[in-house]
Amino acid sequence: MKKILFSLVVIILTSISLNSKAQSQKTFNPGYLDFVVNNHNQLFELSCIPSTVEMILKYYNVVDFDFYDLQYEWKNKSDGSFRNFDQKELFGITFSQKFALPRDENFPIDSLFRTIENELKAERMVIISLPSDPGWHMFVICKQTPEGDFVSYSKLGTHTLILRNTKEIVRKSKGTEIMTYRLSKAVQSN
């Protein structure tokens, strides 16, 4: 009886693992990001940039869920920015910094929002920098609400953060920068 029960548990867990992996790679599934975020942690107070990059890598299953190499390398780097990942390819995903402009009344907010919408329509998420006490924190935008706002996810240690008013936050801060990415053909075909 114990062998049968054990076999059933192994079959069920294998099925769940294969199913979630297939869903994340074959079709864009913002709901799968919930799973990724809930099983991810930000390890250091200032490692939110590599943490969000790791979430993207985990979403596409190019690294395991216990992958934290980028955060361990970064630790509490206080002078880091999206520049550290600009045009950097990691496991078949190339990241690009966008809208590294002064945050003021001349910031092209409408263009920023169109870029994010286009990325989401192309079934790619966007990493965004948003104001947070005492400075800035990075989030992953995974979808747009029916009302047109963006839903953004992040981690603060083990705590999951979800924002549903991303546009309002960006407008109040008079702009922000984002990071987009492109998948290699190898990642797309997995």
Image (cartoon, grey):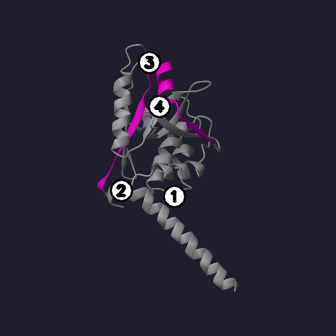
Residue 123 locus on image (x, y percent): 37, 46
Which residues are drawn in magenta?
160-185
Q: Residues within 10 Å of mark 3 (few under 14, many from 20)?
A: some
- Residue assigned mark 2: 187
Classify the position of the C terminus by image quarter. Answer: bottom left
Mark 4 vs 3: CB contact within 8 A: no
Residue sitting at x 57%, y 24%: 135
Residue 99 image position (x, y, % from top left): 37, 27
Residue 145, percent from left and from top: 46, 38
Distance from the alpha carbon under mark 2 to that under mark 4: 25 Å
Tell me if residue 120 is in the magenta stretch.
no
Instruction: Report the amino acid beneath label 2.
Output: Val
Residue at the left extreme of this rendering: 185
> The residue tagged with tag 4: helix, strand or loop?
loop
The single residue placed furthest to the top in the displayed view is 105
Question: Can residue 77 be spotted in the picture?
Answer: yes
Q: Distance of mark 2 from mark 3, alpha carbons? A: 34 Å
Give yes or no for contact between labels 1 and 4 (Cβ–Cβ under 8 Å). no
Q: Which residue is mark 4?
A: 81
Of pointers 2 and 3, the one earlier in the residue sequence: 3
Contact, mark 2 vs mark 1 (Cβ under 8 Å)? no
Numbered badge on residue 64:
1
Q: Amino acid at mark 1?
A: Asp
Residue at 62% in and 74% down: 9
Report the Cα–Cα distance between label 1 and label 4.
Answer: 24 Å
Point 50% across, 47% down: residue:
55
First in sequence: mark 1 vs mark 4: 1
Please say if 65 is above or below 153: below
- Within 10 angstroms of label 2, few (less than 14), some, or many (20 or more) residues? some
Classed neighbour count for the residue bearing mark 1: other residues with Cα under 10 Å, few (<14), some (14–19), many (≥20): few
Q: Is residue 173 magenta?
A: yes
Q: Which residue is mark 3?
A: 103
